[in-house]
Image (cartoon, helix red, strand yellow):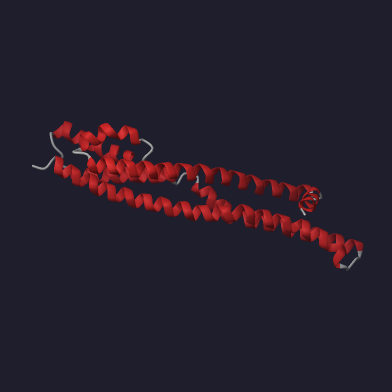
Amino acid sequence: MQSDYWDMVGKTPPLNLAILLILLAFSIFSWTIIFSKWSAIRKARAADARFLRAFRKASGLEAVMVASEQFRPSPLVSVFDFGYEEIDRQVKQRGSVNNKLSVERTLQLGASEEIAKLEHNMSWLATTASVSPFIGLLGTVMGIMRSFHGLGEQGAVSLRAVAPGISEALIATAVGLAAAIPAAIFYNHFGSMIRQMGARMDDFSLEFLNMTERGFSD
């Protein structure tokens, strides 16, 4: 069966072969993104959990700052850095934290930046999921048109005369779906995980503000 598939691919015309190569490139790049994104999100979530435990046990922001370096892959550490730098700036300029709204906005900026990093290359998965089936369909339509054109020239009407060409043409659709389905699945899966991490950043921002109020309350 596999040799039959390779035989059909070997008989594919140059234009259809180019379409197959484009779909293969989409698939390879998508799987590269999937594996790298899976590893990055897994490490980030594990680091988030460890940092959050350390943050809740810490006596104050200074203690968290000292310990934060060992949790550096964590997006929450970056959000903490944004907030801590704003607090440090206010304390140096005014001697206290008197603009909590500015701290809150800074935390939101930090969270937005980390979400943008997590979403990097996600658009490629969405593009692969939406475009690959149509590219494959284009190759199939072109193959079927060529098969019927040859059928008309030969004057043959039997299924045996047209079936091989249609079978070769349908390979493009199969390859397009093979590229699109994993991309769609992991795009939705990673999107859900990133939204959960975004919600955790929002919750952490509230905890950060609470610790700030306790540490700098009058």
Regarding residue 87, the answer to whether it shows in the image is: yes
Of all residues, the one furthest to the left in this rendering is 218
Q: Is 40 left or right of 63, judged from the image as shown?
A: right
Q: Is 10 left or right of 74, judged from the image as shown?
A: right
Of all residues, the one furthest to the bottom in this rendering is 157
Q: Of 19 and 179, which appears nearest the observer?
A: 179
Residue 176 in the image: x percent, y percent? Answer: 65, 54
Q: Residue at x 39, y 53 (%)?
A: 195
Q: Quadrant of the N terminus?
A: bottom right
Q: Quadrant of the C terminus?
A: top left
Q: Of 200 and 158, which appears nearest the observer?
A: 200
Residue 159's quadrant in the figure? bottom right
Q: Is 39 left or right of 144, judged from the image as shown?
A: left
Q: How many marks?
A: 0
Residue 214's quadrant in the figure? top left
Q: Residue at x 43, y 55 (%)?
A: 192
Residue 169 in the image: x percent, y percent? Answer: 75, 57
Residue 157 in the image: x percent, y percent? Answer: 88, 68
Residue 138 position (above or below residue 33): below
Residue 81 in the image: x percent, y percent? Answer: 29, 37
Q: Residue at x 59, y 44 (%)?
A: 29
Regarding residue 101, the answer to whether it shows in the image is: no
Residue 218 position (above or below residue 4): above
